[in-house]
Image (cartoon, helix red, strand yellow):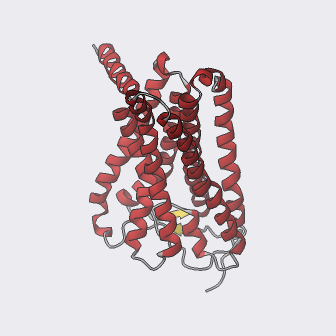
């Protein structure tokens, strides 16, 4: 098969894949996907609205939570167009440029989610281990700088992998394994030496998928050490309860992330359905579950949602 240059004047497309073996049922499969996307959009938008309208929630913990909600919303809106166009209208084609743009946003928002969770673990560490200095350490200016650092870190991490991929020729099948574009899926279609890409991808895995969780575990090691040093079991339980939402959010992100990475690296010959299910869990679980976790486990957010609904109800009257 002849090589296809990325610079050719002929339009270049990738072909997206829905649910292998269930193509005839795509319209029915779209119903749960539509429900999950709706839950994610409504849930994260509600979290943002509650934090914005409630002055009592203008605190570091909830500002970081708003960053998490924005990240989840971005991840949802990045995958929604191609997934729903494929399931609803059976349109599998995506242009070369659109696919690269989607790769950029998917991986940037995924890495941002990891970075925000790391920042939230630092917030919990300061709140529990340095409570007297909490207000002076995590000022609005510091939180703003952390937010900018997260954005810069993730963009600078993703862009080189795209530049490295764009310079390579695609001459194998243009059929992708998912209903959206992922870097690890596109790289297998390249018919050139990809060692540089592989080493850079490995460096990213070390930098984010491994380093971020290790730093989160380290922060919780200090937190547990501090909690166990307190005299009262009531204080220990209160401190742990304050961290529970964040711990669940960490698990919801990293368990699927590690699972999809392991599947791509060590289960290449597994059923395509396995890869599709793992990738969808990886991208849909955090945006769907995080608003539910924080709404159920965080009293202030729950009260804010009730207050927001009651205000809207009064306005309608």
Position of residue 50 in the picture relative to residue 189 (left or right): left
Tell me: residue 231, above or below residue 216.
above
Residue sitting at x 60%, y 68%: 12
Residue 133, located in which quarter of the rendered image?
top right
* Image spot of residue 123 (x, y percent): 57, 33
Tell me: residue 317, above or below residue 125.
above
* Image spot of residue 75 (x, y percent): 50, 47
Residue sitting at x 45%, y 56%: 255
Q: Residue at the bottom extreme? A: 1
Position of residue 145 in the picture relative to residue 216 (left or right): right
Instruction: Pick whichever, 115 or 77, lies toward us.
Output: 115
Tell me: residue 15, above or below residue 227.
below
Residue 222 visible to the viewer? yes
Residue 17, located in which quarter of the rendered image?
bottom left
Q: Quadrant of the C terminus?
A: top left
* Image spot of residue 227 (x, y percent): 48, 34
Position of residue 317 in the picture relative to residue 105 (left or right): left
Instruction: Pick whichever, 84 or 295, lies toward us.
Output: 295
Residue 164, located in which quarter of the rendered image?
bottom right
* Image spot of residue 278 (x, y percent): 42, 63
Residue 176 visible to the viewer? no
Residue sitting at x 72%, y 59%: 160
Instruction: Pick whichever, 307 or 169, lies toward us.
Output: 307
Tell me: residue 261, above or below residue 37.
below
Q: Quadrant of the N terminus?
A: bottom right
Residue sitting at x 69%, y 40%: 149
Q: Give the number of callouts.
A: 0
């Amino acid at each position: 098969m002849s090589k296809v240059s990325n610079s050719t004047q002929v339009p270049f497309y990738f072909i997206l894949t829905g649910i292998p073996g269930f193509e005839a049922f795509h319209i029915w499969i779209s119903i749960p996907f539509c429900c999950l996307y709706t839950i994610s959009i409504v849930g994260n938008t509600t979290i943002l609205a509650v934090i914005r309208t409630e002055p009592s929630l203008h605190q570091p913990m909830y500002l970081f939570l708003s960053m998490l909600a924005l990240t989840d919303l971005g991840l949802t809106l990045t995958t929604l167009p191609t997934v729903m166009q494929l399931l609803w209208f059976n349109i599998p084609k995506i242009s070369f440029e659109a696919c690269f743009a989607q790769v950029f946003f998917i991986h940037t928002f995924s890495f941002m989610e990891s970075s925000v969770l790391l920042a939230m673990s630092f917030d919990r560490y300061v709140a529990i281990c340095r409570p007297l200095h909490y207000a002076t350490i995590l000022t609005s200016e510091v939180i703003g700088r952390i937010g900018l650092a997260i954005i810069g870190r993730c963009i600078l991490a993703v862009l080189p992998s795209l530049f490295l991929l764009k310079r390579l020729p695609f001459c194998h099948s243009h059929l992708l394994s998912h209903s959206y574009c992922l870097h690890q899926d596109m790289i297998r279609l390249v018919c050139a030496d990809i060692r540089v890409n592989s080493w850079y991808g490995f460096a990213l895995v070390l930098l984010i998928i491994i380093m971020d969780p290790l730093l989160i575990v380290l922060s919780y090691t200090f937190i547990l050490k501090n909690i166990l040093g307190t005299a009262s079991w009531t204080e220990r339980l209160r401190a742990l309860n304050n961290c529970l939402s964040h711990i669940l959010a960490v698990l919801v992100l990293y368990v699927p992330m590690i699972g999809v990475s392991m599947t791509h690296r060590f289960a290449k010959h597994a059923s395509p359905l396995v890869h599709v299910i793992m990738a969808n869990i990886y991208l849909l679980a955090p945006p769907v579950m995080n608003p539910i976790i924080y709404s159920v486990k965080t009293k202030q957010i729950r009260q804010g949602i009730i207050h927001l609904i009651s205000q809207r109800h009064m306005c309608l009257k």
